[in-house]
Amino acid sequence: MQETKRLSAAQSKSLVVVLGLAIALLAAGSIWWGLSHPTPASLKVVTPAQTPGGPAVVQAKITVNGMSCEGCAASITSSLTKMGVDSVVVSLEERSAVVTFRTDKISLSTILEKITEIGYEPKLDS
């Protein structure tokens, strides 16, 4: 028969203190991260992930500098659509693009990189 080991009162107290400190540190880190890295107003979760870290549908409004004609807008729309975004609405007048995408298909950084690659300067509105 196997003997069960038990913690002494002092060991139990130490364990509780260490766990409490770890939880407090994680909470403080989470609060700091949220305050120092706010979600831009131009980034909106359309459909939240069903599981933590799972796919979500996100809509981002991106300022696009360097557009001068409808051909520019068509180039951005075509390039992003080919990459797998759900929808792209480009406004030449506002110099912006509203992009809706699924996070399991493509990332925001990939979208911004593509816009840069085709010759424009994207900036996520804050």
Image: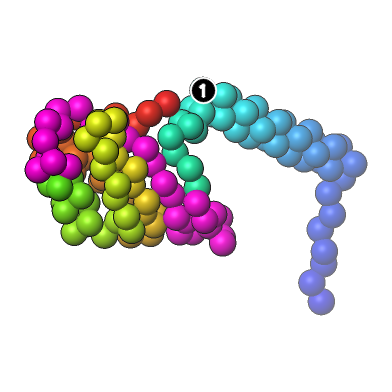
Q: Residues within 10 Å of mark 1 (few under 14, many from 20)?
A: few
Residue 75 location, x and y as percent? 12, 46
Which quarter of the picture shows residue 98? top left
Q: Is residue 112 left or right of residue 32?
A: left
Q: Quadrant of residue 70?
A: top left
Residue 58 drawn in magenta = yes
Q: Amino acid at mark 1?
A: Ser
Task: Identify residue for label 1.
Answer: 36
Q: Quadrant of residue 63?
A: top left
Q: Is residue 53 visible?
A: no
105 with respect to 2 (left or right) = left
Where residue 23 appears, x then y in whole percent? 70, 36
Q: Residue at 62%, 28% (x, y): give it.
A: 31
**Viewed as shown, does residue 33 lie left or right of 73?**
right
* Rendered-image quadrant of the C terminus: top left
Chain part drawn in magenta: 46-73
Q: Nearer the viewer, residue 79 or 29?
A: 79
Q: Viewer-proximal residue, 8 or 29?
A: 29
